[in-house]
Image (cartoon, coloured by chain):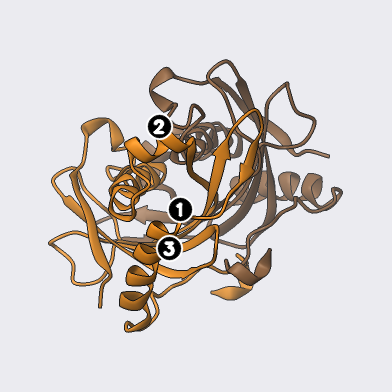
Chain colours: A brown, B orange
């Protein structure tokens, strides 16, 4: 069960490392790039950012590497809003390739709505964005949880 | 209190996003790149990988974004081995820039030693690598914990 598709991308040759697979950090690059599509979808797009000087900052990101991705793969990313409040979005992601039925990566991010003025400070979402987030939340609430989810890392946990 | 320095890097212009700061995913790119220096230091270098077909895979990565990094910054990364067993390394990272006394980012990763044969499977570290890991562990054990550490994400946690 997946969230909403937010992007598809091929794998650039320079993203492959000496292990012959997608380097760990480039899963994060893919997530970050496709999250721009989510921002457009909820109304925090380039025009909104230019007018309001409001944007999203990432507070935390957590990735589980589940399967190797090769240069010939195309990666589809699905995203959900697990939770949100007046200024934060707790999102989860699942990345898929056609070769595998299960995700190659699951991830979570905590995003904060901020105003970039003389200083940077958190700011409440406008009502239009809150309405969009409520729509995304409703989709997520109807799905079983993305697994594995974020957790404290430790050798005992495996 | 920091771990061992494993790398320094400038910020490439293409790593800066529309928010005017280092895009979240490129903190992970920096961590991944400098971790290659750690692999060299513990003997999992290119020669070892070529001869044994053994290498490290990342199982999990967790990043806390604490302060913005600008294009003019140079990022120093310190690393520690928080824990290890016969085939896994639980590492933590702190990233610093000269402008700030406190880290701009803390992160943790779980790394697995694998053999890339016809299939990929976990493999025990050789004694020489275990000896190096014991040295890194000793340094880490003498330091207070890196904060914030990895955890289950949630809106209630802030």
Chain under numbered label 2: B
Nearest to viewer (mark 3 / mark 1):
3
Above or below, A153 against B124 in this view is below
Q: Do labels 2 and 3 share a chain?
A: yes
Measure how far apart labels 3 and 1 are at the Cα level.
36 Å
Nearest to viewer (mark 1 / mark 2):
2
User: Which residue is under mark 1?
Assistant: A58
Residue B64, by quadrant, is: bottom left
Q: Is mark 1 on a helix, strand or loop?
A: strand
Measure how far apart labels 1 and 2 are at the Cα level.
38 Å
Q: What element carries label 2?
A: helix
Residue sitting at x 28%, y 53%: B41
**Which circle's residue, 2 or 3, is located before the other in the chain?**
2
Point out the image quarter for the N terminus of chain B.
bottom left
User: Which residue is under mark 2?
Assistant: B50
Provide residue A82's location: percent of width, then percent of height.
70, 54
Contact flag, marks 3 and 1 (Cβ < 8 Å):
no
Provide residue B96's location: percent of width, then percent of height.
23, 61
Q: Are marks 1 and 2 on the same chain?
A: no
Above or below, A39 against A92 in this view is above
- Residue B122 placement, left or right of B130: right
Camera sees residue A122 = no
Along the viewing direction, whichever of A21 and B53 lies nearer the viewer: B53
User: Which residue is under mark 3?
Assistant: B130
């Amino acid at each position: 069960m997946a969230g909403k598709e937010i992007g598809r991308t091929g794998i650039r040759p320079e993203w492959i490392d000496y292990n012959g697979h997608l380097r760990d950090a480039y899963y994060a690059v893919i997530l970050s790039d496709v999250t721009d599509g989510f921002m457009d979808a909820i109304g925090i797009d380039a025009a909104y950012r230019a007018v309001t000087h409001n944007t999203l900052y990432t507070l935390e990101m957590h990735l589980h590497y589940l399967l190797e991705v090769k240069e010939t793969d195309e990666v589809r990313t699905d995203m959900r809003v697990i939770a949100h409040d007046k200024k934060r979005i707790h999102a989860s992601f699942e990345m898929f390739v056609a070769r595998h039925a299960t995700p190659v990566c699951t991830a979570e991010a905590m995003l904060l709505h901020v105003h970039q003025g003389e200083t940077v400070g958190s700011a409440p979402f406008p009502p239009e964005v809150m309405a969009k987030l409520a729509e995304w939340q409703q989709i997520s609430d109807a799905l079983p949880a993305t697994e594995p989810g974020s957790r404290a890392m430790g050798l005992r946990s495996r």
